[in-house]
Amino acid sequence: MNAKETDYKRVLLGSEQELAAKVISLEATVAALENKLHDISQKGSVYTRWGRNVCPGSSELVYKGFTAGKYFNEAGSGSDEQCLPSDPTWGRYVDGNYGDYRARIFGAEIDLPEATRYFPYDVFEQDIPCAVCRTNHSINIMIPARTSCYAGWTEEYSGFLMAGTHERIGAFDHICVDGRPEFLQHGGTNDNQNILYLVEAQCGSLPCPPYVQGRELACIVCSK
C-alpha cells in the first residue's frame, strides 16, 4: 500500500483518538438507555383487586371504590367492569337521566345461592367494592383457571372468575373477584343491576380433560 492510499484510509476512518472518543460516546449512550429502562421497570404496574377495598401485601393503594358496570340485561352501555372511586369529582354536568343519549353504569352485586360452597361466608346479593393497587413489579397478569402463579411470578391475590350470566343480553368482562370479598355497608339488598356470576367450563372445543364440564373456574392475579 502506497502513501496516498494510507492517507485516504485515514481520512475515511479518522484518527485512532477520534474512533476511541466515538466508542466512549456510544458506551455512554448505551449506559444511559439501560438506566432509563431500569427506571421504567422500577415504576411498577397497577391492577384492580375486585371485591376488596384494600391492597394485598406490599402493594400500594392508589384508590378504593365501587365495582360497577352495565345493567345486567341491557344490550348497550360499556361491557367492561369499572372501579369507580369512592371520592368522585365532577366536570360539567346536568343532573337527571337523559334517555337514549347516554350510557349507564350501576353498582355490582354477586348472585350466588349456596355461596358457602365456594366462599368462606355468604356473599349472595352483596354489593362489592374494589381497589386499584400498585405493585413494584413492572408487569401483572390475571390468569383464569389457576389457583397458583407460574414459576417466577408473585401472587397478588386469588379468587373466582366472574362475569354476566349466559342467559341474558349484553356482554360483561371477565374479572377475578377476591376469594374473601368485602361488602359495601347496607349493600345486601337485591338491586338486580350489575350482577356477577361464577363462570363454568363447557366441554367441546374446550378440551375435557384438562377441564371438567360445569366446573367453576378459579383465578389469580400475578406480578413479575
Image (cartoon, helix red, strand yellow):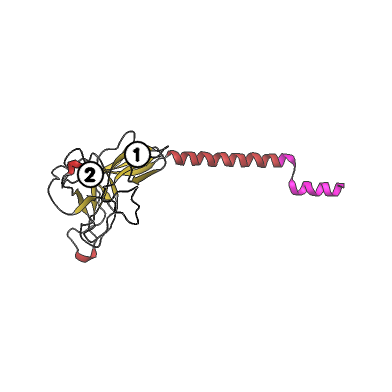
Picture residue at 34% right of the left edge, 39% below the top: 148
Q: On the rendered structure, is 96 left or right of 205?
A: left
Q: CA distance from mark 2 to mark 1?
A: 24 Å
Number of other residues with Cα within 10 Å of mark 2, as a class: few under 14, some 14 to 19, many 20 or more: many
Regarding residue 46, the answer to whether it shows in the image is yes
Q: On the rendered structure, is 36 left or right of 132?
A: right
Picture residue at 17% right of the left edge, 39% below the top: 121
Regarding residue 183, the answer to whether it shows in the image is no
Number of other residues with Cα within 10 Å of mark 1, as a class: few under 14, some 14 to 19, many 20 or more: some
**Amino acid under disc 1:** Ser
Magenta-drawn segment? 1-18
x, y percentage for residue 130?
25, 44
The quadrant where residue 91 appears: bottom left
Q: Nearer the viewer, residue 67 or 199?
A: 199
In the rendered image, residue 68 lying in the magenta stretch gets the answer no
Reading the image, the residue beneath label 1 is: 148
Q: In which quadrant of the rendered image does the C terminus lie?
A: top left
x, y percentage for residue 53?
24, 40
Reading the image, the residue beneath label 2 is: 129
Q: Nearer the viewer, residue 116 or 92?
A: 116
Q: Earlier in the sequence, mark 2 or mark 1?
A: 2
The quadrant where residue 150 appears: top left
Q: Nearer the viewer, residue 83 or 207?
A: 207
Outermost residue on the front side: it is 209
x, y percentage for residue 7?
82, 47
Q: Which mark is residue 123?
A: none
